[in-house]
């Protein structure tokens, strides 16, 4: 292993500006870093506000129920064709192959496939013995982040990773995207997590998922209208989030640039 000896470090030559110049540089950096810290805090707050606004809009849709919404009084397990738990062991992965959906790959309604782990056809067959995930099925995260749920898009083949649940809605009752939204609304998320287990990490139990009461639901035609309206709101939120993430990245680069200038005599 490479290492630095005390003698090597002690003999290192360091160029220093005069003390007055050091004071000038520190004063400039202090003021600049204070401004950057304030801008970063404001941007992070705006980013959180954008996400909260979307959740508020989603909740308001489910609060505006009318007479067309019907409460069946049946648990989620009776409104779906199947609810299947994943294998409780880690699948062997490889560079190429079928995406293995772990909890970090489950977003708010969509799968996040950047950097996804992959498995072989043989592993896929073994890990999907209980049920083969199909387009239109939902995958719910039981942990980290517990409660997130995504819909498998068309022409997509995936394998269930650990701590996930496959939900296949009865298409006579639910549009898959609507069911995902219903599960993501803040009230339903609270219901899912009320009985979560785990001292440090929230964990949703299969029993609670199957017994979940979704309340009243609209007819399929209205579900499709709601999905379209939420998609527009989601696009606007994603644009805002992208702007704020870019600003955070720019602030981090600005800080690096100022430090470089300070120690190269260009500040």
Image (cartoon, rainbow, N blue to C red):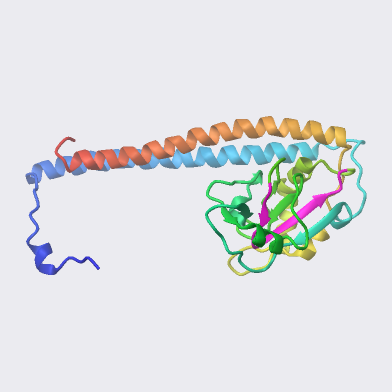
Q: Quadrant of residue 177?
A: top right
What residue lies at 84% left-to-right and 33% top-to-bottom? 222
Q: Position of residue 171 (x, y in %)?
A: 86, 44
Residue depicted at 51% across the width and 35% down the height:
242
Left or right of 136: which side holds 48?
left
Residue for point 64% across, 69% down: 89
Residue 170 highlighted magenta (yes or no): yes
The foreground one among 105 and 10 is 105
Q: In which quarter of the image is the C terminus?
A: top left
Relative to 19, say whether 9 is above or below: below
Q: Position of residue 55 (x, y in %)?
A: 67, 41
Question: Relative to 216, does residue 131 appear above or below in the rendering?
Answer: below
Image position, residue 166 (x, y; %): 74, 55
Horizontal placement of 196 versus 220: left or right? left
Q: Taking the image as drawn, is residue 52 in sight?
A: yes
Count every numbered label the image shows and give the total: 0
Q: Horizontal placement of 95 versus 22: left or right?
A: right
Rendered residue at 67%/59% (across/down): 124
Q: What stretch is highlighted in magenta?
A: 157-171
Report if residue 20 lies within the magenta region: no
Q: Is residue 209 visible?
A: no
């Amino acid at each position: 292993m490479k290492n630095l000896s005390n003698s090597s470090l002690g003999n290192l030559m360091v160029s220093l500006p005069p003390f007055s110049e050091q004071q000038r540089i520190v004063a400039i950096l202090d003021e600049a870093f204070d401004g950057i810290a304030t801008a970063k805090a404001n941007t992070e707050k705006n980013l959180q506000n954008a996400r909260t606004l979307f959740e508020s809009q989603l909740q308001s849709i489910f609060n505006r129920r009318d007479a067309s919404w019907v409460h069946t009084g049946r648990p989620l397990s009776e409104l779906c064709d199947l609810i299947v738990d994943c294998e409780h062991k880690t699948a062997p992965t490889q560079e190429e192959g079928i995406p293995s959906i772990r909890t970090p790959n489950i977003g708010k309604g969509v799968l996040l496939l950047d950097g996804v782990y992959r498995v072989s056809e043989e592993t896929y067959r073994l890990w999907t013995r209980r049920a083969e995930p199909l387009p239109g099925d939902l995958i719910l995260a039981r942990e980290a982040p517990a409660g997130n749920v995504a819909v498998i898009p068309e022409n997509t083949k995936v394998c269930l990773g650990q701590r996930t649940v496959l939900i296949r809605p009865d298409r006579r009752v639910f549009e898959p995207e609507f069911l995902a939204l219903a599960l993501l609304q803040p009230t339903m998320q609270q219901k899912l997590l009320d009985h979560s287990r785990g001292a440090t990490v929230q964990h949703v139990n299969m029993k609670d998922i199957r017994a979940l009461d979704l309340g009243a639901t609209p007819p399929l035609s209205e579900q499709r209208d709601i999905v379209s309206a939420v998609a527009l709101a989601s696009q606007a939120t994603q644009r805002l989030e992208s702007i704020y993430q870019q600003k955070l990245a720019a602030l981090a680069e600005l800080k690096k640039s100022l430090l470089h200038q300070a120690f190269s005599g260009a500040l």
